[in-house]
Each structure stands twice: as C-alpha cells, then as structure tokens.
Image: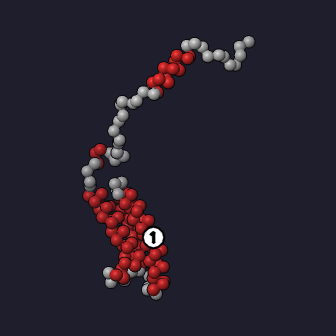
Amino acid sequence: MPTARTAPTAEAAPRAATTAGTAELPRTNVRAPVSSIPESSQRYSVTDVIAGLMAAGSILLSFIATGFGVILTIEPRPARLAPVAAIVALVAGRMSVRYQRLALAAVFVSMVAFVVGMSLAVITKHPII
C-alpha cells in the first residue's frame, strides 16, 4: 500500500535549484509606466478645459463662502454659496476624467467652507441665508 507522503526524488532537487536561480536574476524587460487615459484622448478637449474652470470656480465660491467675501466687500452667505460650490465641483468631476482629483479637492474645500463660514456668520452675527 503506497503512503501518502513520498520522499523527494533526485530529479526534483535540481529543478528546484534552477527555478530558484532564475527567480534571483534581475528582470531586463521592464515596461514603461502606462497612463490610465486612452492614447486617442491625450489632447485636452473643450470639455476638459471647462471642467477645470468649473472646479477652480468652485474653489473660489468656497473661499467667498468661508468669509473672505467680507474682505472683498461681497456679502458671504455660506448656506447658499457652499452647497452651490459643491454641486459645481461634482458636475466638473463628472464631466472630465482628467480633472477628477481637482474636483474632489474642490468638494472637500466646499465642505470645510460651509462649516467655517457658518461658524463665522453665527459668531459675527452676519446673515446665514
């Protein structure tokens, strides 16, 4: 009756040595990093430019909502401006793959602007809406 475990044969040892030896060799055929954007759309389109401007405009609206509007003599109303800035940033992120990270940053800036702007409006007794 054969046992479940068998001793390694003499042929298995040289094969294991050769495979271990090839694993230690440096790789010579390393490929260049690849972009996730398809090659046919490497150029900026009008949609990309508009999405970038919308994301940047969203950040500007967020700064006005934060309270910098008082410095610019613009009445900051954080309950109006910050949600609009977040919606504009979300639309910009959906429009273009190229500016999704900028749009994400604009959404986070608008969230912080909402909290800071509402706090400053309550403390300084400015209108919220």
The front one of 122 and 50 is 122
* Kind of element beneath mark 1: helix
Residue appearing at x 36%, y 82% in the figure: 70
Query: Which amino acid type is shown beneath numbered disc 1?
Result: Val
Residue density around tag 1, few if under 14, some if 14–19, many if 20 or more, within 10 Å:
some
Residue appearing at x 26%, y 54% in the figure: 44
Placement of the C terminus among the 4 image quadrants: bottom left
Estimate the x, y position of residue 17 in percent, counting from the top left.
51, 20
Left or right of residue 42: residue 8 = right
Relative vertical location of residue 110 with respect to residue 19 in this rendering, above or below: below
What colour scheme governs how the chains and residues are painted in the rendered image of this protein? Answer: secondary structure
Residue located beneath label 1 in the image:
112
Estimate the x, y position of residue 101 in percent, counting from the top left.
39, 57
Q: Quadrant of residue 6?
A: top right
Left or right of residue 41: residue 85 = right
Estimate the x, y position of residue 21 in percent, counting from the top left.
47, 23
Residue appearing at x 34%, y 45% in the figure: 35
Placement of the N terminus among the 4 image quadrants: top right
Relative vertical location of residue 87 with respect to residue 8 in this rendering, above or below: below
In the rendered image, the residue lying farthest to the bottom is: 125
Q: Quadrant of residue 109?
A: bottom left
Left or right of residue 120: residue 2 = right
